[in-house]
Amino acid sequence: MTGSRKQLGGVAFLLAQLGAHAANRFAERIGELGLTPVDVGLLRMIAVEPGRSQQSLAAELGVVPSRVTALIDPLDRAGLVERRRSKEDRRNYELHLTDKAGEVMAGIRQVATAHEGEICTALTDLQRTHLMGLLELIADQQGLTPGVHPGYRRP
């Protein structure tokens, strides 16, 4: 710390302040693509595990399956996600990204890279790596699911 910043709160407050700033800035940036941060998270989760069921997505997000339906519907209508009946269990749907989503994901990667660069401008590469390690330790100790934003649990 440079000493030029008068700190009025502790680590938790600073994390919350930076987290809110980063989230708001990311929402602005991704909004230019016509997406929300929730959309981006869902697309990423489906891209990592194509063909996953809505139930598995609900379990990972910690929400009821009907919440996933409500979250996926706009992506389906936008032509980014396709629901396919499972060949193994016809009661379930598998989620797949469309070709259009593949193009959108390239834009998302560009926005995310620029966003991370902007947020971490004040850090050297070594400091950034060290901060990432410290934040991962805290997240693990708090029992947070890697890659899943707790905001999905909101109704």
Image (cartoon, rainbow, N blue to C red):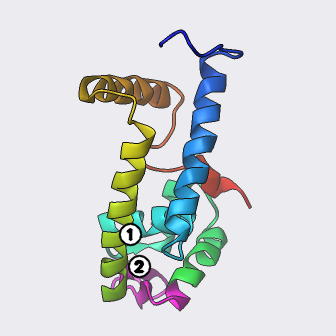
Query: Is residue 79 located in the magenta-colored stretch of the structure?
Result: yes
Q: Position of residue 62 (x, y in %)?
A: 58, 54
Q: Contact (CB < 8 A) between labels 1 and 2?
A: yes
* Residue drawn at x 42%, y 87% as measured from the top left: 82
Magenta residue check for 126: no
Q: Residue at the location (45% across, 40% down)?
A: 119
Of helix, strand and loop, which one carries label 2?
strand
Q: Nearer the viewer, residue 3 or 8?
A: 3
Residue 77 coordinates in the image, percent (x, y): 55, 90
* Apparent side of residue 11 relative to residue 139 in the rendered image (left or right): right
Q: Which residue is mark 2?
A: 95
Residue stretch rendered in magenta on the structure: 76-97
For residue 74, above or below residue 138: below
Name the amino acid, label 2.
Answer: Leu
Residue at the (33%, 62%) spot, across then down: 109
Q: Secondary structure at mark 1?
A: helix
Q: Is residue 69 above or below residue 136?
A: below
Q: Residue at x 60, y 16 (%)?
A: 5
Give the residue pinned by disc 1: 46
